[in-house]
Amino acid sequence: MIQLVKDVNKNENQVFVLNKDNKAVLTIPETLDDFVKKFEESKKEEDFAKLGDQYFFFVKENSDLEKMRLAGYNIRKQLDKKATTLNIIGSGNTTLALAEGFALSNYQFLKYFKEAEEMKYALNTINVKGDFSSKEISDLNNTIKAVYWARTMVNEPVSFLTATQLAKEIEALGKEANFSVKVLERKEIEDLKMGGLLAVNKGSIEQPTFTIMEYKPANPINKKPIVLVGKGVVYDTGGLSLKPTAGSMDSMKSDMGGAACMAGTIYAAALNGIDVHVIGLIPSTDNRPGGDAYAPGDVITMYDGTTIEVLNTDAEGRMILADAIAYGNQYDPEVIIDAATLTGAALVVAGDVASCIMGNDEKTIQEIVKSGYKVHERLAQLPFWDDYKDLLKSNVADMKNIGGRYAGTITAGKFLEHFAKVPYVHIDIAGPAWMDAPRDYKGNGGTGSGIRTLVDFLANYKA
């Protein structure tokens, strides 16, 4: 990935970040003097020249870090796929943002292509020269690695990534990063009486899983853990409330984006040695209209004893998350935070450029929003008044699982809040978690949305 170097090979591809501090010391070939002078005087933010097979990229430093990430993406787009090494010369967080954008753009999911080897980018080494610490580089690499993992999980079809396989993939992360992982299977889930998870799983021939992760550093700054809950619906047909295929069901392998986000966050936090005690909970299943599938009109008893009238089996994410959130109360956490590709209504609210955030812990919400702006994974805060909970009243049970036509993203959050007995924050990542077409450094398909935000949130957390 990205590595810090003292010197660069002058015969390799070069990126120069032009600013007041390093402009005078750039070792640029004399043959490019006129090009560089014209670039410095131009209004262009970036440009490149090519001498033989060697690329020279020039980027004007910008305090807007997102513009630097996009410059990294543009360099990846211009650079030959056969290039093996890129050297970036610059300083400060602007140069790191450029390297981050390039590295995120370098991700490919080629597993199912016959010509995968021929399509693969040759470049896997990004050398950075500048006033950086090895810790800064290492932390950035680990976070990008976690985003890569999450993207791959979201991109994997259910023919490979069943609930059982997702649990195995998380176990592998735990072994690598040294955090504990415990996987509960059907019998243990039944013993816990997780009615929501079991109901959604009834139409499937695959068993459900409930994965418990724990990362606890030697001296955590928080006396109580932070609990992260991620929706792990590995494929969603809508159940008996069947989705239409085109533009809806065909991308529903992405419905475990919340699980990928939370597992990836704990993975990066452990690799980076962040001093925060974190517990992760991943309820997982597919949602199918099989012979014993749960049906609209059913009344389900949840883990905490709450009874739910099911009016739509496609509102399954909240059913499995509710059990996990209720389970999380036993840890007496400082806050429970969930991430989920929960509602299509979130796309109506904020499109695919932002997630929706809501909850009853304003301090935590504002810190997450702040981190989101920092890494350009923006969050739109929605109202969370109790008026919306009234829309979930049922005539035959404690609650119903949908609130009606209006404010669908908010009523889904209010449904989940019922199960949290501690401060609670809900993040609906349905918009930015998946791209139907290539989108700058986010790529095509799974984006790993939320990981960079939550890693920054944990790294700057104050108990």
Image (cartoon, rainbow, N blue to C red):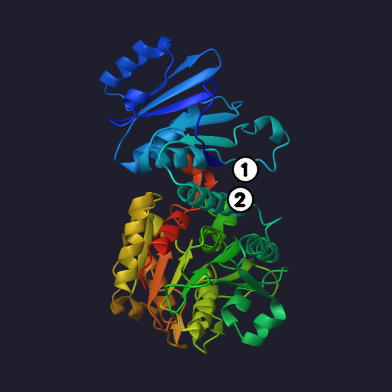
Give the number of the disc on residue 441.
none
Viewer-nearest residue: 302 or 57: 57
Where disc 2 sits, the SS reads helix
Please state the horizontal and vertical placement of residue 217, each as a whole percent of the image: 52, 70
Residue receiving disc 1 = 109
| Left or right relative to 419: residue 382 | left
Q: Callout 1 environment at 10 Å: few (<14), some (14 to 19), or many (20+)?
A: some
Q: In the image, 18: left or right of 75? A: left
- Residue positioned 50% across, 42% down in the render: 104
Instruction: Left or right? Give the position of 377 relative to 262.
Output: left
Image position, residue 64 (x, y; %): 30, 41
Using a 10 Å C-alpha cutoff, classify the residue at mark 2 as few (fewer than 14 neighbours), some (14 to 19) or many (20 or more): many
| Quadrant, the C terminus | bottom left
Proximity of marks 1 and 2: CB atoms separated by less than 8 Å:
yes
Q: Quadrant of residue 419?
A: bottom left
Q: Which residue is mark 2?
A: 152
Give the secondary structure at mark 1. loop
| Residue 169 placement (x, y as % from top left) | 67, 60
Gap between marks 1 and 2, in whole Å?
A: 7 Å
**Residue 434, image x, y percentages:** 50, 50
Image height check: is 215 above or below 76?
Answer: below
Residue furthest front as drawn: 6
Quadrant that contains the N terminus: top right
Give the mark, 1 or 2, whose residue is nearer the N terminus: 1
Looking at the rendering, which quadrant does residue 173 occupy? bottom right
Q: Mark 2: which amino acid?
A: Thr
Q: Is residue 125 above or below residue 169?
A: above
